[in-house]
Structures are given as structure tokens and as C-alpha cells.
Image: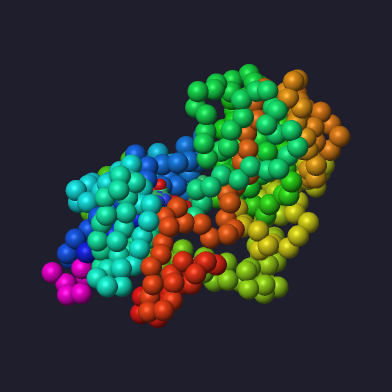
């Protein structure tokens, strides 16, 4: 058993908490308790079940190097595969430490005992020498402040709380939003709906995803020569990491060459997929690349080109009138049966679902971490 790792409480069993659990166990933590609010592990990948939900990072980079999965069907794994991966991680020796439906409600540093006292929602207190907080950040769906939103008479929901009970076939569906979740779900909704209206506020810079199926032959190779496959995967990971690092740094560090390379990639993608100049203009961002997240999608633009799809203008104002299920944007009235919000998450303002308090020397932790959690010397 490694020296120095005592009892650990991990709060949250998304990918972060699961990885911490596996590594802490390998390192010989004297005691390991993982508290999870939900009834299953997975975090983001459990919560988001909208059609088309997938990882937008190649799996060679997104999966953990110490926990390779061999079940992937595509370079960019779909949500059910990601959720299965999380369950596999839990099965790798974490179940006995895992407490589901057991949200942590309070973590208090006990200076006298020099340990954390973590209280769960059942009132049980777990003592820990180390507290790992893996609560995630993207779990508070954000709904826009559209006047009349609550009066929409048909079903409506946020992408992160997908209503699988409603069949979209033949329905007039509105999707508000055109960013990361929207570019994944719009092609799926477009395939099912009778008519789709996309309400876009700001177009995004979008490049090709170039997703590829992982063939049966690839999988057989993985089974028969895992060492060779892992060494290839490691090389691929290094390559993606180096390229992405250089490439993204160029764009976000505002080098003219980096920005132009990203913008040219996105412009070529748009031109190749959208021939209608009016639609192309609507989908062309009027701000420099790098100001918002650069997206990768192969089937978003083609979905917008379908005859039964209408992409709204840059929407500045909207209102909803409940009785006739109308949605009004830019002066036009759209009759809709279903309204879907792909409007992202609350990301600003630090939020912990666990109260965290106690004193380190003379500093109150809740005060020290009021604006965000950083390191306190030797805490
Ligand atoms: C739709 C969507 C798609 C995404 N796609 C990508 C992608 O393609 N690539 C990428 O890099 N990132 C992506 N992300 C970001 C993604 O959130 C991270 O990659 C990663 O999955 C986060 O893992 P996590 O464990 O930190 O947090 P989460 O997955 O959010 O897990 C946090 C866990 O903590 C639990 N919890 C919260 N409060 C408590 C409490 N008080 N007590 C106990 N448990 C609690 C939650 O129930 C949850 O299970 C995406 C996010 C979303 C929302």
C-alpha cells in the first residue's frame, strides 16, 4: 500500500470521479468512498440522451489511456457507447465503493481531527483525509428568457432532458439554438420531423468531423493483438494531441495564420455543403474564429438544406404565444407542435451542489472559494 494516501471521498461519478476512483484504488488508498447523486454513473453521458448525442473529440484522445475501450463503433463515440464505457469503469472494481442516489450535501474540514467530514443526503457522515470534488460543470440546462416561453401550448424541452415519449414523426418542430448540442441533434430531428424550423441567434464556425466507422476487422485486430493496437492508439493519441494543441493554440492565441487556417477550413466546409447563397450567408459567422467554440459536424449543413427545413435569420427577438403554439421570430410567425431548446448550460458563476466549509488556519473555506475554487496553501 502506498504511503500517504489515507481515506478518500470522491464526490461525483462522471468520467472525472470514475478516473479518480480507479487511480486512487491502484495507488492503494486506505479507504475509498464514491458518492453519486444520480441513480447511475456517467454524469454528462448519463444525462444527455438526445438523438445524435456523441463525443466531439476522437475516441483515441477522449478515452482514458489507462482504460481503453474495445467496443467503439465510430471514431467519435455515440452517447450510449460513452455511457457503457462509464459503466465498464465502474465495473473495474469501483462498485463496492460506489453509493448511488447518495448526494453529498456538505463537506466540512474538521481542523481538530484534521480530516474532512462529508455528509450525504441520508445524514451519514464519511470521514476522509482527502476530498476529491468531481461535480462537473455542465449540468444546469439554460433556458432563454423568451417572452411567453411558458405559454407554449405544445410539448417543449431542453436537449439535456430529452422527452423520449414524444414521437416527432410528421410534427412541426422548432429547435432554438445552433451550437454544440444543436448541430448533433438537428440532423436527427430533421430526419423524423414533418417540418423543422431552426432558430439561430449566432452562426458558428464549423469544420468537417470526418467521422469513421470502426470496422469488424479493426475490432478483430484489437482482440488478437491488443499490444500492437494500443501502441498504434498511443501514436494516434500523440499525433492528435500535438496537432490539436498546436492548431488550437494558433487560433485561440490569435495568431493571424492560425485564425485564417481555421476560418478557411470552415469556409470550405460550408461552401462544399451549402450551395444556396442566401442560406450560406445566414450560416457565415460575422465574428473572428476563436471567439466561440469551434465545432465539428458533417451532417448539420446538409440537414439545413432539406426542403422541409427552414433556418431562421439571425434571431434577435422572439416571443411565444401559447394558444396557437406559434413562435414569432424576426416578425415571422411559425406554427409549431414541438419546441426544443438546444440552448446550452449555465456555465458562469461557480456552483457546487455540495456546501463546502470549515477553516484552514484562520481562513474560512467558503469565503476563500466564493469566486471559484483554487488551491489554498497546503490544503
Ligand atoms: C452534451 C455534452 C456533450 C459533451 N461532449 C464533450 C465532448 O465531446 N468532448 C469533451 O471533451 N467534453 C464534452 N463535454 C464535457 C463533459 O462534461 C466532460 O467531457 C466530462 O464528461 C465531464 O466529466 P465530469 O466527471 O467532470 O463531470 P460530469 O460528467 O458532469 O459528472 C459529475 C457527476 O457529479 C454528480 N454530482 C453532482 N453533484 C453531486 C453531489 N452533490 N453529490 C454527489 N454527486 C454529485 C453528478 O450527478 C454527475 O454524475 C460534453 C458535455 C455535454 C453537456
The spot of residue 299 in percent (x, y) is 60, 40
Residues shaded magenta? 1-6
Could you tell me what secondary structure mostly forms the magenta stretch?
A: loop
The spot of residue 275 in percent (x, y) is 76, 41
Which residue occupies the foreground of this view, 46 or 192? 46
Using the rendered view, name the quadrant where residue 143 is placed.
top right
Q: Is residue 334 magenta?
A: no
Q: At x 30% / y 65%, what residue is drawn?
A: 116
Using the rendered view, name the quadrant where residue 72 is placed.
top left
Q: At x 74% / y 33%, what residue is drawn?
A: 148
Would you say residue 221 is visible in this rendering?
A: no
Which residue occupies the foreground of this view, 110 or 327? 110
Quadrant location of the N terminus in the rendered image: bottom left
Q: Decide: is 172 above or below 259.
A: above
Q: At x 32% / y 54%, what residue is drawn?
A: 119
Which residue occupies the foreground of this view, 6 or 230? 6
Would you say residue 287 is visible in this rendering?
A: yes
Using the rendered view, name the quadrant where residue 6 is placed.
bottom left
Please, which colouring scheme is shown?
Answer: rainbow
Amino acid at each position: 500500500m502506498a504511503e500517504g494516501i489515507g481515506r478518500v471521498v470522491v464526490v461525483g461519478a462522471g468520467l472525472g470521479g470514475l478516473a479518480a476512483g480507479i487511480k486512487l484504488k491502484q495507488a492503494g488508498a486506505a479507504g475509498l468512498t464514491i458518492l453519486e447523486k444520480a441513480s447511475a454513473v456517467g454524469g454528462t453521458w448519463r444525462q444527455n440522451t438526445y438523438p445524435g448525442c456523441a463525443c466531439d473529440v476522437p475516441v483515441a484522445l477522449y478515452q482514458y489511456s489507462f482504460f481503453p475501450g474495445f467496443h467503439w463503433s465510430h471514431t467519435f463515440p455515440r452517447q450510449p457507447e460513452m455511457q457503457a464505457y462509464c459503466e465498464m469503469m465502474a465495473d473495474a472494481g469501483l462498485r463496492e465503493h460506489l453509493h448511488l442516489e447518495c448526494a453529498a450535501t456538505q463537506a466540512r474540514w474538521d481542523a481538530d481531527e484534521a480530516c474532512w467530514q462529508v455528509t450525504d443526503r441520508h445524514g451519514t457522515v464519511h470521514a476522509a483525509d482527502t476530498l476529491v470534488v468531481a461535480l462537473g460543470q455542465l449540468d444546469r440546462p439554460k433556458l432563454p428568457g423568451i417572452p411567453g416561453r411558458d405559454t407554449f401550448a405544445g410539448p417543449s424541452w431542453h436537449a439535456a432532458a430529452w422527452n423520449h415519449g414524444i414521437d416527432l414523426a410528421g410534427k412541426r418542430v422548432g429547435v432554438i439554438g445552433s451550437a454544440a448540442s444543436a448541430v448533433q441533434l438537428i440532423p436527427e430531428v430533421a430526419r423524423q420531423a414533418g417540418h423543422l424550423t431552426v432558430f439561430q441567434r449566432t452562426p458558428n464556425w464549423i469544420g468537417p468531423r470526418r467521422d469513421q466507422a470502426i470496422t469488424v476487422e479493426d475490432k478483430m485486430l484489437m482482440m488478437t493483438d491488443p499490444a500492437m493496437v494500443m501502441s498504434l492508439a498511443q501514436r494516434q493519441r500523440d499525433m492528435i494531441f500535438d496537432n490539436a494543441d498546436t492548431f488550437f493554440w494558433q487560433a485561440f492565441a490569435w495568431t493571424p495564420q492560425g485564425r485564417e487556417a481555421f476560418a478557411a477550413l470552415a469556409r470550405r466546409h460550408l461552401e462544399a455543403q451549402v450551395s444556396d447563397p442566401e442560406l450560406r450567408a445566414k450560416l457565415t459567422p460575422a465574428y473572428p474564429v476563436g471567439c466561440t467554440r469551434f465545432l465539428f459536424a458533417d451532417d448539420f449543413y446538409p440537414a439545413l438544406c432539406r426542403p422541409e427545413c427552414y433556418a431562421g435569420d439571425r434571431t434577435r427577438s422572439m416571443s411565444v404565444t401559447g394558444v396557437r403554439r406559434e413562435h414569432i421570430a424576426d416578425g415571422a410567425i411559425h406554427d409549431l407542435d414541438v419546441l426544443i431548446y438546444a440552448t446550452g448550460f449555465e456555465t458562469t458563476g461557480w456552483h457546487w451542489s455540495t456546501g463546502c466549509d470549515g477553516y484552514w488556519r484562520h481562513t474560512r473555506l467558503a469565503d476563500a472559494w466564493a469566486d471559484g475554487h483554487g488551491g489554498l496553501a497546503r490544503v
